[in-house]
Image (cartoon, rainbow, N blue to C red):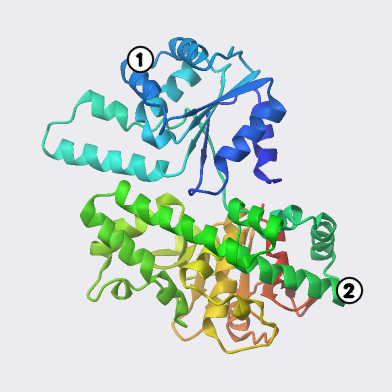
Amino acid sequence: MKRKITEQLVAWKNRPGHKPLILQGARQVGKTYILEKFGEVYYKNHIRVSLDLVPDVRSFLKENINPLEIIAYLESLYNVRITPHDTLIILDEIQDCKRALLALKYFQEEYPQYDIVAAGSLLGVAVNKGEKAQEDEENTSIISNEADEDFSYPVGKVDELTLYPMDFEEFLWATNNDVLAVEIREHYKTNEGLVESVHKMALDLYQHYLIVGGMPESVKKYVETHSFIECRAIQQNILNGYDSDMGKYAKPATTVKIKACWNSIPAQLAKENKKFQYKLAKKGGTANIFGEAINWLILSGTVLKCKLVSHGILPLAAYEDDSDFKIYLSDVGLLGAKVQMPVPMLLNTVETNNTFLGAVAENYVAQSLRANGIDLRYWKNDNTAELEFVIQDGMSVIPVEVKKGTKVKAISMNTFVQEYESPIAYRISSKNFGFGNGIKSIPLYAAFCIEVE
């Protein structure tokens, strides 16, 4: 399936003096698939080393991380001639072999002509775990050089990219709706409404996306069968895998806290005030108790964090409140599966007062914005006004309001616009494209069009 990140991978390959690349992302977002396709299409040959499955490679790296000896070893092991610039070396699941991570530094410094891409699902978790281990050892004065090497991230020695679940545009490509995707982008630019029949078709596909989500295996199954039941089965398997990871990559005491936070997310999003409350994870919960668990979920790529900003002025990062935040799942399809949301409820076009449908739409928009590299922030004042998102685009601060349907009261948006004199605001809803009174109307299905400088 076509993925947008391919263009970024090609740009990396063609950039003179590029460094080894680390591709991060949650499990099952398609990292291995896209890298193998990249190797097949853009290189004469490629090899993939599954570091979680090939103990011989891990054993070799424990004794030797000299780049030329690694190349010679891999050539012998895989019976493939590795040629600079023409061979892509894929080091998969690199979080399971920290010595391979360290080796990237020496490739960059001594033999940059070799094209190496490392993929890691829980790399951030593994590195963070290693850093904490070093801190503990430092506190007891028993840190060793080997431990320091094992958990040393090659800062400045690698290029980095992150792969997210497929966004709605990629879903349209996968379902042979390429022309519709182009038309949506054109109308986003002109603010002219789509023909009503086309608008309805796009909304129907958007509702299907809410169920199927953006995990490639689920999208593939939908394309093959159009069975939402089979998609849900795949999503449940992915959720089970995430649950297993929490036990595999964290200490038992931390695992309990991670799962408590993870399982509280539906309840967090069901509230009218979606600020993450530790007491919903466990009665009496605090940031001191659950802060590490939240950080684990973020580093694993399974959730997205949206921070509060107290003022809608530049730069937004200067006004972030790190203690006040919302948490979304990284994939809206997994959210529906996790809460066992009935499929007919997501397909229903009749306006209802179900607040969780609003949370689903909000999660979808958060996922769309983050996939486009936009930092997630929201705003609220001391009274009752609250905006789902606030975007910094160049020299502009843009308020973003999200509505699940066509009822679009804009009290909070008007408050923000008046207080900060915003030249433009975005309203994302089920309504068609349009523009009036400084408000750009964006249909929910067009959230993938929102990009920043």
Q: Is 199 on the left or on the right of 360, as rendered?
A: right
Camera sees residue 390: no
The residue pinned by badge 2 equals 195
Mark 2 packing: few (<14 Cα in 10 Å), some, or many (20+)?
A: few
Picture residue at 56% right of the left edge, 73% below the top: 360
Q: Is 269 on the left or on the right of 452, as rendered?
A: left
Give percent across and percent down for residue 161.
56, 40
The residue pinned by badge 1 equals 64
Identify the amino acid type marked 1. Answer: Asn
Q: Earlier in the sequence, mark 1 or mark 2?
A: 1
Spot the residue most to the right.
195
Q: Which of 394 and 65 is in front in this view?
A: 65
Label 1: which secondary element: loop
Residue 116 to residue 424: above or below? above
Q: Nearer the viewer, residue 90 or 283?
A: 90
Picture residue at 71% right of the left edge, 45% below the top: 2
Camera sees residue 439: yes
Q: Is 315 on the left or on the right of 396, as rendered?
A: left
Q: Is 288 on the left or on the right of 202, as rendered?
A: left
